[in-house]
Amino acid sequence: MTLGLINANPVVHERRERLSRADDPPHYPYPHPHPHSHPDDVLDALDVFDSVRDIRDPEHPYSLEQLSVLSEESITVDEKLGRIQITFTPTVQHCSMATVIGLCLRVKLMQCFPPHFKVDIKVSPGSLANEEAVNKQLNDKERVAAALENPNLRQLVDECLYSSELYSY
């Protein structure tokens, strides 16, 4: 965690119970049978949400779900077009961690889903003072690659991704 918290007192929400669908197979990353195998075996927003909901916030020991930074409703999937779109809402308008959150989402999706999916990650309109710049940065492959080459930034992203495994269920 960083010193001088940007949002020292975030509102923490209860985690939603994980929804299960009948005949759920064991959890494997997509494209193997994924946790919500359903008719037509189509990827949907719940599948994506389940893969990112436990990412830890860079500032706090809470998940992005617990801080209402993202929800199942903030994710759209069009499997026919091969698109996943996530819109997330930082907890404060001047959040300097929005780019880190977006990088965490992108890395997690790259790990969980096939590369043919085009992933768009955006902050909710009006939720961030520098929203346009952050959106541009998060969806520029060269900028993302350069950011992930920074060892300190990569370590922070990895901590957010892998510390979530300690309390996911």
Image (spheres, grey):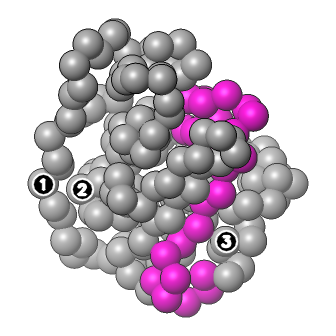
Along the polypeptide, which appears first: circle 2 or circle 1? 1
Q: Pointer 1: what residue? A: 14
Indicate the amino acid at tag 3: Asn
Front-lying residue, 72 or 81: 81
**Does residue 103 belong to the magenta stretch?**
no
The residue under the point 54% across, 48% down is 77
Q: Position of residue 82 (x, y in %)?
A: 68, 41
The residue under the point 58% across, 19% down is 31
Q: Residue furthest front?
A: 40
Q: Position of residue 104 (x, y in %)?
A: 55, 48
Q: Is residue 167 above or below residue 134?
A: above
Q: Position of residue 71 (x, y in %)?
A: 34, 57
Cβ atoms at labels 2 and 1 below 8 Å apart: yes
The alpha-carbon separation of the residues under discs 1 and 3 comes to 28 Å
The residue under the point 65% across, 40% down is 80
Q: Pointer 2: what residue? A: 66
Q: Pointer 3: what residue? A: 135
Q: Is residue 152 visible?
A: no
